[in-house]
Image: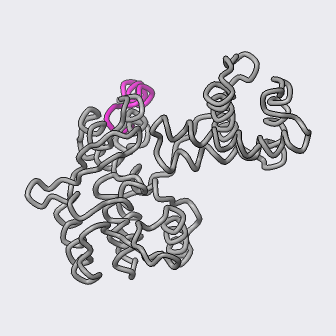
Amino acid sequence: MDDYFKSFKEMISLRGLTDHTITSYSTYIKMYLEYLNSLNISADAASWQIMRDFIVYIQKSRRLSDRTINAAISQLRFFHIYVLHKPWDQSQLPFRKFDTYIPFVPDKKTVWEYISTISDLRFKTIVILMYSAGLRSGEVLNLKYQDISRKTMRIHITHGKNRNDRYAVLSKQALAVLTEYWFACGKPMDWLFPVKSSRSGELHPIQNGTLTRMIHKHEKDLGWEHRISAHTFRHAFATHCYENGVDLLTLKTLLGHKSINSTTIYVHLANTTFQKYQNPFDQMWEDHHE
């Protein structure tokens, strides 16, 4: 089984996927190989029924959502094609249909209350950059000194999602806070938000898990219900920009979306969307009660 897993990781690396994707893709394949080992079956000999049984097993034992199950099926597909070199039959293990949902988006007052009550300057700067530029957590944590352009007031995002570089907007006030942080925290010239490894002593970016814990802790300190994540600030930036009149194509560029379909969700999230037209029933009522 170790040989299969080694081959799997080699094929992921050869495809040039990011470290985050490599880690993500390894999760359920490792579980799958351990599952096969418990049945004393090699991966080459595993049938479609065995794979279906594995999917049912992890869903029940871990109470996984349909979205997560689709991720596991996607990993099995990769393993089947690129490691076992066998054709994939989607009819044997189809992707699940799942309900779409509208994410929580705090209003501007709530965002300000959250940010203004953060006492830790580094954490505060990170959250401000996520909100003011619409950055993903991985994008803000991997920022380097040279990515910040005071001259053009832009942030260079390198190797964002889908490995696409882009420029994000740099807010004047966000730059002021970032500058304050930079001077106060040792003028970092490589990673903007570094931490020192306890083992090697080398500097590396803050991990996503650490940021998530910081976000939830501050939410708890405020006595709020647990609704905020790192991605909440990106959603809030996009929604508030749309409410301020930014068109969808510009918003698509700012967010680095590959498709405009990903951007149109903010039409549904914006408060102004339903305020731009008169409800036909209200109009009918007014016409008959003049």
Instruction: Give left or right: position of 228 versus 51.
Output: left
Q: Is residue 278 magenta?
A: yes
Q: Is residue 68 above or below residue 214?
A: above
Whole-percent x, y for residue 78 in the image: 62, 30
Q: Is residue 41 left or right of residue 84?
A: right
Residue shown at the point (43%, 28%) measured from the top left? 285
Compared to residue 161, the image places residue 179 above or below, namely below
Q: Which residues are magenta?
A: 274-289
Image position, residue 220 (x, y; %): 56, 74
Residue 72 pos. (x, y %): 68, 38
Quarter of image, res 56: top right
Quick one: which residue is furthest to the front in this view? 3
Relative height, residue 66 to residue 85 (above, below): below
Q: Is residue 245 left or right of residue 85?
A: left
Residue in the image at 84% along x and 48% along y: 61
Can residue 219 be seen at all in this image of the molecule?
yes
Query: Which image quadrant: the N terminus?
Result: top right
Quarter of the image where one finds residue 75? top right
Residue 289 in view in this figure: no
Furthest residue in direction left, as rendered: 151
- Residue 178 x/y as whole percent: 24, 71
In-front residue for pair 213/243: 213
Q: Name the main secondary structure of what is drawn in magenta.
A: helix
Q: Is residue 116 magenta?
A: no
Q: Give the residue drawn at x 28%, y 62%.
A: 144
Q: Is residue 259 left or right of residue 49?
A: left
- The C terminus lies in quadrant: top left
